[in-house]
């Protein structure tokens, strides 16, 4: 299994320390979790920094840590815009949704849809189905991400890694609910930001300093900084059109405002001001992480080709196949472990190229952190959706109503067992579908989330029809592009147009929502007063 | 008519103004992203992107104040 990079005891100690701390947090927070409000929204008592740090680690999935650095060295500088867009969406969310939703203070994500659009049962289904699908995909993806770190850096067998990840997340989410999830997520945020920052510094030092670093990158990949209008061409066809660059910008841009696993964190803040201040911290911490990932991603190829232990073995294969040496190194690593995708191993390979066991320990902790915090964040969304919203409010289960904490804990176990079983042998398509999961939520229930607060004419009919039409439309076009053209980033009717993850549906969903709202019966005066007037008033 | 907070309007203008300005400058000067400053050779454009992240922090601070 090994390819020559052994596991240093320092790395093992780092990982064990990390696991012990997050389990201890779970045990400690158990005594704080008395009521359903404690379990679902941490008693609405979380301060700005803790909430902001928890938001950062929950929102940024292992795709950020594992995939983004590789996408940067493959797609080049234009992909930086995708990274910047994610951070740029955060301040907008502060006023668009965070402040008003905290003032409204629901318990679960679907409460808002039920109350605002006067559909006590249908709202749970309309907002719940895309959330359930996206949540399951993300939990599986994040469990696989956690396992990849354990397999590649600790050499724990894959299935045991999935099992371990699921059990540890299970332990602290079941015990401490949102308290444990929040405190652990905040701790995990510090670890992952530190890990990326330290790795970026270590890579620059290894390559001979800031100036040499960037010159070496340019020498290794002459087109890495090219933009679509450059006469010399771009590094990758996906970035050959400005539509592709801007498309990647908008694919993830509004996620922070409307994705269920971030929105619920607005409910946990102490008050409106704390909710907004949380986002200031998220922007700072996320900004440091992504600025570091831009450095890491840009230099990953150069450092791997120069220093990675597999470079000598991969060189003749790369020469024979005419492919970049770094890609062949990643292929060899992926072949060794046999899981995930080639792109998942870039940050691991970059860290291995630096050759420091302390650094590897930090990377293990950072990687496990970003993956496990996303699992836990989504688990909290899913257990409140299924236990409280569906079993309790929709189907009238007395058990879910009378014993909410126990019911949520049972559903947490069920969700993690189901997702863990799928993650043991994850179909490739399931992992890919996480890109669709993002677009479907923004296109189907995003407009009703945001416009429900900011537009008096936003109607129930528009909410239902936008969700009904956008959910299949995004899935069918995404799947068609993936199956027919090989990648979901081509416009589904033409390979000549680059539309990352069929992002245009986000805007079509918005326009559709507005048009249907204008054509249908306006909401009640009471709903308008409550959501479009009172939620805007400063406290 | 709905009263949209001025802070939100300014956030949108600041955010997209900065991004659109970048895209226009990049489109008009495609080589700008790989230029190095003589004597202190750092990629100017990387500094500008970091500037965008700092810009976001400023906007987030205005929103939260």
Image (cartoon, grey):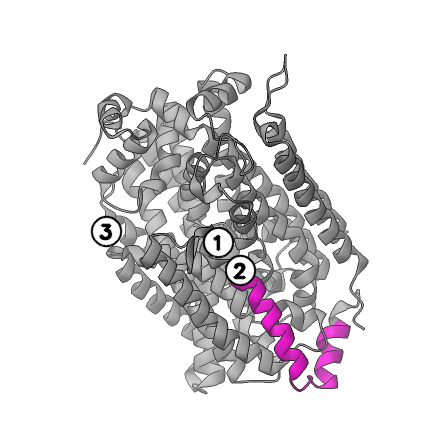
Q: Is residue A280 above or below residue A472?
A: above
Q: Mark 3 lies on which chain?
A: A
The mark nearer the N terminus, 2 or 3, is 3
Q: Mark 2 points at which residue?
A: A504
Q: In which quarter of the image is the N terminus of chain A?
A: top left
Q: Mark 1 points at which residue?
A: A499
Q: Where is residue A445 in the image (x, y as percent from the top left)?
A: 54, 70
Does A6 sit left or right of A28 as displayed? left
Does A70 sit left or right of A333 as displayed? right
Residue A478 vs residue A232, the one in the foreground: A232
Inter-mark Cα distance, 2 to 1: 7 Å
Magenta region: which residues? A505-534
At horizontal 40% and vertical 42% (from top left) the residue drawn is A66
Q: Which mark is residue A183?
A: none
Q: Quadrant of residue A375?
A: bottom left
Same chain check for tags 2 and 3: yes
- Residue A108 visible, this angle: no
Check if mark 1's residue and mark 3's residue have beta carbons within 8 Å. Answer: no
Q: In which quarter of the image is residue A312?
A: top left
Query: Residue lying furthest top in this view?
Result: B39
Inter-mark Cα distance, 2 to 3: 38 Å
């Amino acid at each position: 299994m090994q390819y020559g990079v052994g596991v240093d005891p320092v790395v093992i100690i780092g990982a064990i320390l990390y696991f012990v701390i997050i389990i201890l947090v779970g045990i400690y927070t158990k005594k704080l979790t008395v009521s359903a409000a404690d379990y679902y929204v941490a008693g609405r008592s979380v301060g700005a920094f803790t909430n902001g740090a928890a938001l950062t680690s929950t929102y940024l999935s292992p795709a950020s840590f594992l995939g983004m650095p590789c996408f940067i060295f493959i797609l080049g500088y234009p992909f930086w815009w995708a990274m910047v867009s994610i951070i740029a969406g955060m301040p907008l969310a502060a006023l668009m949704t965070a402040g008003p939703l905290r003032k409204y203070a629901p318990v679960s994500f679907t409460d808002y849809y039920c109350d605002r659009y006067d559909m006590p049962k249908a709202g749970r289904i309309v907002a719940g189905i895309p959330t359930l699908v996206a949540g399951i995909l993300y939990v599986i993806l994040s469990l696989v991400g956690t396992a990849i770190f354990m397999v590649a850096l600790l050499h724990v067998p894959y299935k045991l890694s999935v099992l371990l990840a699921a059990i540890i997340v299970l332990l602290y989410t079941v015990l401490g609910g949102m308290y444990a999830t929040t405190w652990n997520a905040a701790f995990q945020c510090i670890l992952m930001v530190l890990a990326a920052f330290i790795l970026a510094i270590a890579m620059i030092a290894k390559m001979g300093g800031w100036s040499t670093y960037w010159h070496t990158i340019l020498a290794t990949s002459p087109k890495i900084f090219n933009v679509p209008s450059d006469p010399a061409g771009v590094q990758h066809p996906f970035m050959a059109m400005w539509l592709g660059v801007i498309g990647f910008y908008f694919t993830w841009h509004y996620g922070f405002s409307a994705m269920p696993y971030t929105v619920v964190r607005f409910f946990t803040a102490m008050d409106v001001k704390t909710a907004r201040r949380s986002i200031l911290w998220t922007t700072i911490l996320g900004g440091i992480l992504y600025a570091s990932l831009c450095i890491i991603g840009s230099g990953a190829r150069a450092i791997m080709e120069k220093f990675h232990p597999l470079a000598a073995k991969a060189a003749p294969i790369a020469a024979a196949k005419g492919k970049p040496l770094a890609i062949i190194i990643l292929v060899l690593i992926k072949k060794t472990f046999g899981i995930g995708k080639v792109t998942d191993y870039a940050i691991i390979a970059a860290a291995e190229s630096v050759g420091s066991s302390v650094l590897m320990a930090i990377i293990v902790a950072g990687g496990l952190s970003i993956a496990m915090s996303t699992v836990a964040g989504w688990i909290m969304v899913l257990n409140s959706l299924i236990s409280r919203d569906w079993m309790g409010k929709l189907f009238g289960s007395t058990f879910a109503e009378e014993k909410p904490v126990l019911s949520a804990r049972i559903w947490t176990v069920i969700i993690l067992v189901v997702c863990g079983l799928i993650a043991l042998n994850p179909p490739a398509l399931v992992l890919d579908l996480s890109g669709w999961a993002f677009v479907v939520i923004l296109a189907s229930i995003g407009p009703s989330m945001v416009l429900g607060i900011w537009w008096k004419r936003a109607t129930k009919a528009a909410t239902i029809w936008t969700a009904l039409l956008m959910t299949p439309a995004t899935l069918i076009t995404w799947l068609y592009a993936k199956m027919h053209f090989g990648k979901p980033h081509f416009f589904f009717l033409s390979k000549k147009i680059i539309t990352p993850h069929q992002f245009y549906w986000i805007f079509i969903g918005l326009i559709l929502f507005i048009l249907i709202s204008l054509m249908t019966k306006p909401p009640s005066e009471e709903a308008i007063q409550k959501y479009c007037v009172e939620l805007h008033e400063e406290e | 008519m709905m009263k949209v907070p001025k802070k939100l309007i300014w956030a949108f203008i600041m955010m997209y103004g900065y991004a659109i300005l970048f895209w226009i400058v990049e489109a008009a000067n495609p080589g700008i992203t790989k230029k190095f400053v003589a004597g202190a050779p750092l990629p100017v454009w990387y500094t500008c992107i970091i500037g965008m992240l700092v810009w976001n922090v400023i906007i987030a601070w205005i929103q939260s104040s």
